[in-house]
Image (cartoon, helix red, strand yellow):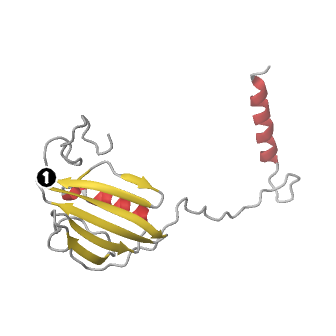
C-alpha cells in the first residue's frame, strides 16, 4: 500500500488539473513573477580605455601590456634591475586575470605569486636570462598601481624564480 500512495497522489493531481479546464476554476491560478537578475558576485569595472603605449626599451617588447596603462616612471638601478611604475583604470582582479591569460602564451613562465585582497604579485621568467615580477595594488575599485621589475642577469641553478643560494643556511629561501 505504501508504494502505491505516490502513484495515487499523482493520479489524483493529474485528474484535478485535467478537469479544471476553464478560467473560472476553483483552483488558484499561478501568477507569473518577474525576478530581477541577481547581482554579480564581484564588482566589475568598465573596460579599460584603449591606449597605445610601448614599454621602455629595457623591457622586452613582447611582454604583454595591461590595457589602458599609463606609465608614470621608469628607472634602472645600479645592479641592473629595471623598474617601471604604471597605473591602470582596471580592477586588481582584472589585471591578475590578464597576466595569467596573456603571459604564458607569450613565452613567459609564471612563478608562484602571492595575492591578498588589495595586492598581488606575479613573478615570471623567460628563458634562462630574464626574470621579473609584476606587482599590483588596488587604489580604488577600478584603479590599480603596478610595479614591473625585470633583470637580464643570467640565472643560476635551481628554481629560476628564487635567488641563487649563497648563504650559510642550507635553505635557499631568504627567511630560512
Left of 73 or right of it: where is 37? right
Residue nearest the observer in this picture, 174 or 124: 174
Name the spot of residue 120 as percent of width and height, x first.
39, 58
Find numbered disc 1 in the image and state the secondary structure of the residue it sits on.
Answer: loop
Please state, as top left, top right, bottom left or bottom right, where the C terminus lies in the image. Answer: top left
Looking at the image, which residue is at 31% across and 60% down?
99
Name the spot of residue 13 as percent of width and height, x first.
79, 40
Using the rendered view, name the quadrant where residue 32 is placed.
bottom right
Residue nearest the observer in this picture, 25 or 152: 152
Using the rendered view, name the quadrant where residue 119 is placed.
bottom left
**Count of residue discs:** 1
Please state, as top left, top right, bottom left or bottom right, where the N terminus lies in the image. Answer: top right
Task: Kindly give the residue lying farthest to the right in the view shown.
Answer: 26
Residue nearest the observer in this picture, 14 or 143: 143
Residue nearest the observer in this picture, 175 or 150: 175
User: Which residue position holds label 1?
Assistant: 127
Looking at the image, which residue is at 79% across and 33% down?
9
Looking at the image, which residue is at 30% across and 72% down?
85
Looking at the image, which residue is at 49% across and 67% down?
44
Name the spot of residue 165 as percent of width and height, x first.
19, 42
Left of 86 or right of it: where is 91? right
Task: Kindly give the residue lying farthest to the top in the view shown.
Answer: 1
Label 1, residues with CA under 10 Å away: few <14, some 14-19, many ≥20? few
User: In the displayed structure, would residue 106 be above or below residue 88?
Assistant: above
Amino acid at each position: 500500500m505504501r508504494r502505491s500512495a505516490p502513484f495515487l497522489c499523482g493520479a489524483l493531481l493529474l485528474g484535478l488539473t485535467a478537469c479544471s479546464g476553464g478560467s473560472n476554476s476553483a483552483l488558484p491560478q499561478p501568477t507569473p513573477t518577474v525576478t530581477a537578475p541577481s547581482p554579480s558576485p564581484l564588482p566589475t569595472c568598465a573596460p579599460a580605455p584603449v591606449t597605445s603605449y610601448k614599454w621602455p626599451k629595457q623591457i622586452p617588447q613582447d611582454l604583454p601590456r595591461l590595457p589602458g596603462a599609463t606609465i608614470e616612471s621608469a628607472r634602472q638601478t645600479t645592479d641592473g634591475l629595471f623598474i617601471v611604475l604604471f597605473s591602470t583604470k582596471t580592477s586588481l582582479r582584472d589585471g591578475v586575470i590578464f597576466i595569467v591569460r596573456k603571459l604564458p602564451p607569450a613565452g613567459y613562465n609564471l612563478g608562484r605569486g602571492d595575492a591578498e585582497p588589495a595586492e598581488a604579485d606575479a613573478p615570471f621568467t623567460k628563458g634562462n636570462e630574464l626574470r621579473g615580477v609584476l606587482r599590483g595594488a588596488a587604489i580604488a575599485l577600478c584603479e590599480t598601481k603596478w610595479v614591473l621589475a625585470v633583470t637580464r642577469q643570467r640565472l643560476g641553478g635551481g628554481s629560476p624564480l628564487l635567488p641563487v643560494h649563497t648563504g650559510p643556511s642550507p635553505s635557499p629561501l631568504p627567511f630560512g
